[in-house]
Image: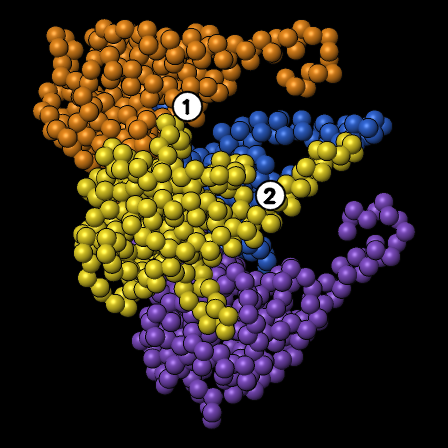
Chain colours: A blue, B orange, C yellow, D purple
Amino acid sequence: MDNIRVVYYEEPDFESPILVEGLPGVGNVGKLAAEHLVEQIKAVKFADIYSKFFPPQVLLDDEGVIRLVSNSLYYSKGEGKRPDIIFLTGDYQGLTPEGQYELSDFVLNLAKEWKVNLIFTLGGYGIGKMIEKPRVLGAATDSQLVEEMKGKGVVFSKGEPGSGIVGASGLLLGMGKIEGVKAVCLMGETSGYFVDPKSARRVLTALCAALDVKIEFSALEDKAAQIDKITSRFKDIEKDLSDSKADDLRYIG
Amino acid sequence: MDNIRVVYYEEPDFESPILVEGLPGVGNVGKLAAEHLVEQIKAVKFADIYSKFFPPQVLLDDEGVIRLVSNSLYYSKGEGKRPDIIFLTGDYQGLTPEGQYELSDFVLNLAKEWKVNLIFTLGGYGIGKMIEKPRVLGAATDSQLVEEMKGKGVVFSKGEPGSGIVGASGLLLGMGKIEGVKAVCLMGETSGYFVDPKSARRVLTALCAALDVKIEFSALEDKAAQIDKITSRFKDIEKDLSDSKADDLRYIG
Amino acid sequence: MDNIRVVYYEEPDFESPILVEGLPGVGNVGKLAAEHLVEQIKAVKFADIYSKFFPPQVLLDDEGVIRLVSNSLYYSKGEGKRPDIIFLTGDYQGLTPEGQYELSDFVLNLAKEWKVNLIFTLGGYGIGKMIEKPRVLGAATDSQLVEEMKGKGVVFSKGEPGSGIVGASGLLLGMGKIEGVKAVCLMGETSGYFVDPKSARRVLTALCAALDVKIEFSALEDKAAQIDKITSRFKDIEKDLSDSKADDLRYIG
Amino acid sequence: MDNIRVVYYEEPDFESPILVEGLPGVGNVGKLAAEHLVEQIKAVKFADIYSKFFPPQVLLDDEGVIRLVSNSLYYSKGEGKRPDIIFLTGDYQGLTPEGQYELSDFVLNLAKEWKVNLIFTLGGYGIGKMIEKPRVLGAATDSQLVEEMKGKGVVFSKGEPGSGIVGASGLLLGMGKIEGVKAVCLMGETSGYFVDPKSARRVLTALCAALDVKIEFSALEDKAAQIDKITSRFKDIEKDLSDSKADDLRYIG
């Protein structure tokens, strides 16, 4: 069997499109951001990507009908200043390093066929603690792109992330650079302990500024409020314990 | 060497056959069910499948004669309303995700050659606790099949199994759907702690209703009684402990 | 690069040769036995097998000169009743299941080219406790071979080894059977805690009976005596502790 | 995609060049040594090697511009007695044994194209304790090279390293020997707990003697001093604890 297989439902033409990648990762920030934008601009699914580098698994819908785990491609034709946008999102990244290289190489080849102008990869930057106002950190394939993104509120901070960027969000930049495809990675700060719609919202704000897109954020803000509710309980417990004189209970925290 | 190799002992012709998969998995439910049906309807082995995706291992019979671990194909020609049935059962599933994809793809290609009409995959659904009357949960490649299976006592329950279906029982559905092959998965509820002939019996009851097959269940019921005997000892110990005033012994439970 | 590469130093002709495999494994029984026989009948190395399925490692001789880890092939031309014998021994077995299949398939193809008459694979059967008189258990590709081996003091015991035979010693039988090559596995009982020359000696006794070979065992017996010395210390300590009244020291045992 | 891909910035001609490998490993000794020499003799990067056997990762420079993880090739044309030198250094070794074999085979094929005269591989030899005056141990593809290296202060010590040499530093020797390429491995003793510029300096001293190169070591000595400062704190704490009468605190050490 082929390592990777695409099933097309439509083969649209693109004009200097932008590719936006948002796959699962730290805090699920990239996936949340990409899926929210897909919904808001009513992007249309045109292909599914299957691969033996994904887990051998099917997922069920509410009726009991299955589908094989996949990545999916959506598109939205440009309007006014907004360019054509292609989205890559999905259930999983490749399970092995070699699988991740193969999958990113595959997407990059599609991007070159479509004459993609610029790739945005979206992700989370795990900092190991709760954060009130997550910054959006950036990385890019060249210094001119770095300057452009600074103008959209993206932070470029020496030594952050110190360990570089792993997975599809990194590889599409790294392999893109070798192939002459420009690319930017936008990383929302996140604790890494929960899915983080708040961080996704910040990433999306930066992306929308870069793409000249105007969207509603209420759905994402609702999710963020729900998560805040859950995480605030953890904070309360933590606070109670540290206020408490019941020192012998401390070990719970 | 080839990744997968089939040795045929016979190459039977089939008329719109049904393929039934029952490989090792949670509670060994699928394998127990498939093997019981093979025995009951005196299905005949016509091929062995060997693969480097299986463990590098041979098994011994009672005389000391070995055989390489394998999956095996059996068939039974239809009688009356009962269609031709092909069985896939065996010692192991593929050891790696990639191996599982390769093996399921291989079987699916055979199924397409044989013009298989419908695939049933059999498995267990681990719920982490002992259960008196296991339900048979279902999943299918389309909603019409879902409706048909509801008529055979199969339960389709929103959000169950929440994590989808992994291994051959999932992949044959997922990859079958892409290839236009209809397929149903029948999952017997099981603790997941023991091999579970009782759950296998329930799965088989649903399958036999769907296939218009009438069989004896006594062998399976005997095995279930044996397992019940073993597991009831565990329950007794548990009960004794919870009744006991020897609270300081509780940690054993 | 090729997955497996052979470097030949000589390409001898064989007349219905016997292939004897003794690679590292439980108690190193197979490797010890094969290497002792190689030495005793002055078998000559005629090829080295290198593979990316082995560890990425070189070994040093006493002068500091390296060699890449490998498997090696030796031969000894027949004399009198003794047939031509080819030996396969070496530093490692394949690291992954797939690598083990590839390597055994490779050796089996050579065996077929050489028109090998019979394969003996040598190994240990770990029983998890010290044993005074290790039996030699057997397994074979057909029941006639089983009968023949019974005549050489090899024990065929229902349900032993219960988990079958893994690695090259199993695969050469399993894959050989499919290819029509006869093969026997001889397994010396061993604790599995130490290298076990005593078990290797027993395996070799059975093998020599089957091959009509007469050899000295003193070198192997010396090694066995050394190991006995070490392991007897463990037994002494164990005994002291169980005799001792210092019950509070018992946990050491 | 290709498993390994080279991007050339220049394709220099070489005259019987020496290849020096210094990739990450124990104490990072090899990489530190190779990179220091690259800097000192102003070697020029002429190619980057990318591979799906490396981690799926990009690294960031201080401005936020990324590059895909890689190995790199540098060269320095000979002067006087000093021969042409090619350097192989980089971010990672292959992640899997198979990947390591593939990568070393790839480099060895380049070495043969360039008609490399001799390969030096640099590494650390972890001894599990701090050491004041690390020796430089050697290994080579033939005994004549062993003798030559003894004249450069390299120690060849029977049974050291007992477990052989793993990774690129071993494979380039082992595979080189099979291909008829001469090679030497220089291993600096190191605790294995810290990066070890002191050990790298000793390795480099031996290498420079062999290559007729004269360089400054101050940068490496500065790094060594920094590391000494950190590790001496550990030693102080250890000493305090062993001097202290606070025996109940000992367990900290």
Up/down of D152 relative to C79, above or below:
below
Chain designation of label 1: B
Give the amino acid at mark 2.
Pro
Indicate the quadrant where residue D44 lies. Answer: bottom left
Is B154 situated left or right of D227 in this image?
A: left
Chain designation of label 2: A
Q: Position of residue C102 (x, y in %)?
A: 30, 49
Q: Residue furthest right?
A: D245
Q: CA distance from mark 1 to mark 2?
A: 43 Å
Q: Identify the residue shown where x is 52% and y is 39%.
A: C132
Q: Nearer the viewer, residue D23 or B138?
A: D23
Residue that carries the numbered disc 2 in the rendered image: A134
Give the amino acid at mark 1.
Val
SS for callout 2:
loop
Q: Nearer the viewer, residue C16 or A136?
A: C16
Q: Nearer the viewer, residue A118 or B180?
A: B180
Q: Position of residue B237 (x, y in %)?
A: 60, 11
Up/down of D226 relative to A159, above or below:
below
Q: Identify the residue shown where x is 16% and y is 32%.
A: B8
Residue C73 at least partly seen: yes
Quadrant that contains the C terminus of chain C: top right
Residue D42 at least partly seen: no
Q: Position of residue C158 (x, y in %)?
A: 37, 27
Q: Nearer the viewer, residue D30 or C92?
A: C92
Residue that carries the numbered disc 1 in the rendered image: B26
Numbered badge on residue B219: none
Up/down of A197 relative to D240, above or below:
above
Is D13 situated left or right of C65 in this image?
A: left
Quadrant that contains the N terminus of chain C: bottom left
Q: Nearer the viewer, mark 1 or mark 2?
A: 1
Q: Are marks 1 and 2 on the same chain?
A: no
